[in-house]
Image: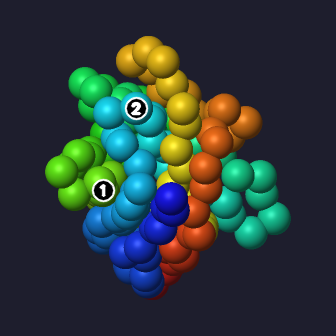
């Protein structure tokens, strides 16, 4: 099983990017998926997560109304659409999977069981 984030890059402030998390080997009906990010010199923080069956999202306050998490169970892929990007969004973005027994997800790193390699997002003019 593996998780692989992709889609990062360099974008100007106000621009958009869509990140993808390839969750090969996972059944997204049994795992909540979260997106986390780590900026240089800072701790990793939860950005968005999505529940396993209903696909209900949750977001950290700083990205609410700018980022959208979604998933395609048939493709085993979770997406993070990022709009109106700001320089403070610059970070390495990771996706992670959490074994859950209910329809919840959390933005707490310690709850996640599986992690993938990150993808760099740089917002700069």
Q: Residue 77 carries which label?
A: 1
Q: Nearer the viewer, mark 1 or mark 2?
A: 2
- Residue 12 falls in which quadrant of the image? bottom left
**Residue drawn 44% across the image and 15% down it:** 102
Q: How many marks?
A: 2
**Which one is in front, 22 or 107?**
22
Asked if the residue at tag 2 contacts the one at tag 1, i.e. Cβ–Cβ closer than 8 Å, the answer is: no
Q: Foreground residue, 119 or 40?
A: 119
Residue 30: assigned label = 2
Q: Where's the C terminus, which quadrant?
A: bottom left
Q: Judge from the rendering whether residue 121 lies leftward or rightward of residue 67; answer left or right.
A: right
Q: Give the residue displayed 73% in from the left and 36% down from the top.
A: 110
Q: What element carries label 2?
A: loop
Image coordinates for residue 124, horizontal then vertical, percent: 49, 80
Name the residue rendered at 29%, 54% in the picture. Answer: 76
Direction from residue 107 to residue 83 in the image, left or right: left
Q: Give 1 or 14, whichever is nearer the viewer.
A: 1
The answer, for residue 101, to whether it is visible in the render is: yes
Tell me if mark 1 has few (under 14), some (14-19) or many (20+) residues whose alpha carbon lies within 10 angstroms of its own.
many
Question: In the figure, 76 relative to 13: above or below?
Answer: above
Label 2 crowding class (10 Å Cα cut-off): few <14, some 14-19, many 20+?
A: some
Query: Quick check: 78 above or below 21?
Result: above
Position in image of residue 107 (x %, y %):
57, 34
Question: Residue placed farthest to the top in the image?
Answer: 102
Q: What is the CA distance from the residue labelled 1 to the residue labelled 2?
A: 14 Å
Q: Where is residue 117 in the image (x, y as percent from the top left)?
A: 59, 69
Q: Quadrant of residue 37?
A: bottom right
Q: Earlier in the sequence, mark 1 or mark 2?
A: 2
């Amino acid at each position: 099983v593996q998780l692989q984030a992709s889609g990062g890059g360099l974008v100007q402030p106000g621009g958009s990017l869509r990140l993808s998390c390839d969750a090969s080997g996972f059944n997204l009906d049994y795992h909540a998926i979260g997106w986390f990010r780590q900026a240089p010199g800072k701790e990793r923080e939860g950005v968005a997560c999505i529940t396993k069956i209903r696909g209900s999202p949750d977001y950290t306050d700083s990205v609410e109304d700018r980022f959208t998490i979604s998933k395609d169970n048939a493709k085993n892929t979770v997406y993070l659409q990022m709009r109106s990007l700001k320089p403070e969004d610059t970070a390495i973005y990771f996706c992670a999977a959490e074994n859950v027994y209910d329809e919840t997800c959390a933005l707490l790193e310690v709850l996640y069981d599986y992690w993938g390699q990150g993808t760099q997002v740089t917002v700069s003019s």
